[in-house]
Image (cartoon, rainbow, N blue to C red):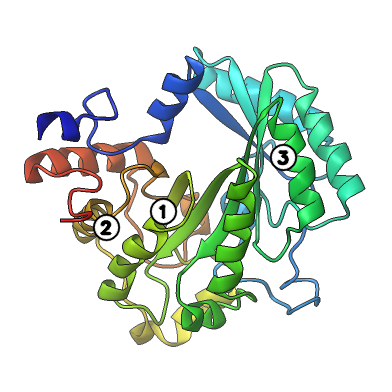
Amino acid sequence: MQNKIYQWGHNRRFNAYTNWCVKKFGSRLQKVSLDAGFTCPNRDGTIGTGGCIYCNNEGFNPSYCSPKKTITQQLKEGIEFLAVRYPRTSNYIAYFQAYSNTYAPLEKLKKLYEEALSCEGVMGLSIGTRPDCIDDKKLDYLQKLNEKYFITVEYGVESCYNKTLEKINRGHSFEKSVKAIEKTAKRKINTGIHLIFGLPAEDRSEMLKEAEIISKLPIHSVKFHQLQILKNTPIAEEYKNHPEKFSFFGLDEYIDFIIDFTEKLNPGITIERFTSEVPPRMIAGPNFGTLRTDRILQLIEKRMEKRNTWQGKLVNS
C-alpha cells in the first residue's frame, strides 16, 4: 500500500505533471504563454458567435502577451518575466494559449510554431485548441515535430456532457473531443485536456462520473478549472440576472470534491493543476478569495494525507 501511494516519487499522492517532467527531462519545464492572434469558430461566425459563455482571455493572458508583438518578442519577455519566479528553470515550452491555436491554414501554423522553436531555451510546444480545429494534415505535421521536440496538444473538452456543451455555446460535441484525442494520441503526441467543474446544468454526481469517463481516454495530462465568473462574458450577465441558477463550490467543499474525483482518476494520467486563478479585477462572482493556486494545492495535498488517499485509489476497487 505504501509503495502504491508514493509510486510517483517526491512523496506525492497524485501523479503531478511537474514531477513527471523532472523525471523525464531532468528539470522543470516552464510554459511561456503566447497570444498569436487566433480566434475560434464559435466566435467568428463559422459555427456560432459570442464564444463560450465563460470565456474572457484577458483573465488568463500575462501582461507580456499581445498579438501585436512577434512570437519571438513574447517569448523573450516571458522568459525574462518567469526567470524571476523560477530562477532554476532553463527549459521552456512555448505555450500557444489564447483561443484556438490550430485555427488557421497549416502554412501559417508552421511559420508561428517554427519561429517559437527557434528561440533559445525553447524545447517544445504546448498548443491549446478545440477538437473541431484539428485535422489529419495538421496532426501529421505535429507528429514530425514531435520526433525532434516535445509537443503537447491541449484540447478544451470542458465537459463530457453534450447538454452542458450546448448550454455553454461550445459548438462541438463530446464525441468530437474523443475523436480528436484518439487521433492525436495515435500519433504518439502528448495529449492533454481541460475540464471545468461547476458549469450550469451539471450536478456533483455527474461531475464525479467524468473521472471514469476521461480515465478511459488515451490522454497524458489534465487541467482542472473551477468555474469562475469573469467580467464581460455572457455568463456574467446570466449570473447577474439569475443567480439562483448557479451553484458554486466553497473552498473546503471543492477540496473534498477534487480529492473524490482524483480517487477515481486513472493513476497514469498526470495532473497539471487542480484549480485556476484570474486577476481579482476580472472576477464577477464567488471565488476562493485571495488564495493562490499554489496555496490551494498545499491544502489539497494536506487533506489527501489526512484522508490517507491518493490518485486512483478507487480505480478497479
Question: What residue did someone put label 2 on?
Answer: 261
Q: Is residue 88 left or right of residue 248?
A: right
What's the amino acid at mark 1? Phe
Q: Residue at x 47, y 26 (%)?
A: 21
- Which image quadrant: the C terminus? bottom left
Classed neighbour count for the residue bearing mark 1: other residues with Cα under 10 Å, few (<14), some (14–19), many (≥20): some
Q: Quadrant of residue 73?
A: top right
State whether residue 104 is above or below residue 45: above
**Residue 9 location (% of width, % of height):** 27, 24
Query: Closer to the N terminus: mark 2 or mark 1?
Result: 1
Q: Nearer the viewer, mark 2 or mark 1?
A: 2
What's the amino acid at mark 2? Phe
Classed neighbour count for the residue bearing mark 2: other residues with Cα under 10 Å, few (<14), some (14–19), many (≥20): some
- Which image quadrant: the N terminus? top left
Q: Residue at x 34, y 47 (%)?
A: 290
What kind of element bears circle 2? helix
Q: Which mark is residue 105?
A: none
Comparing 101 with 317, the one in front is 317
Question: What residue did someone put label 1 on?
Answer: 224
For the residues labelled 2 and 1, the Cα–Cα distance comes to 11 Å
Q: Nearer the viewer, mark 3 or mark 2?
A: 3
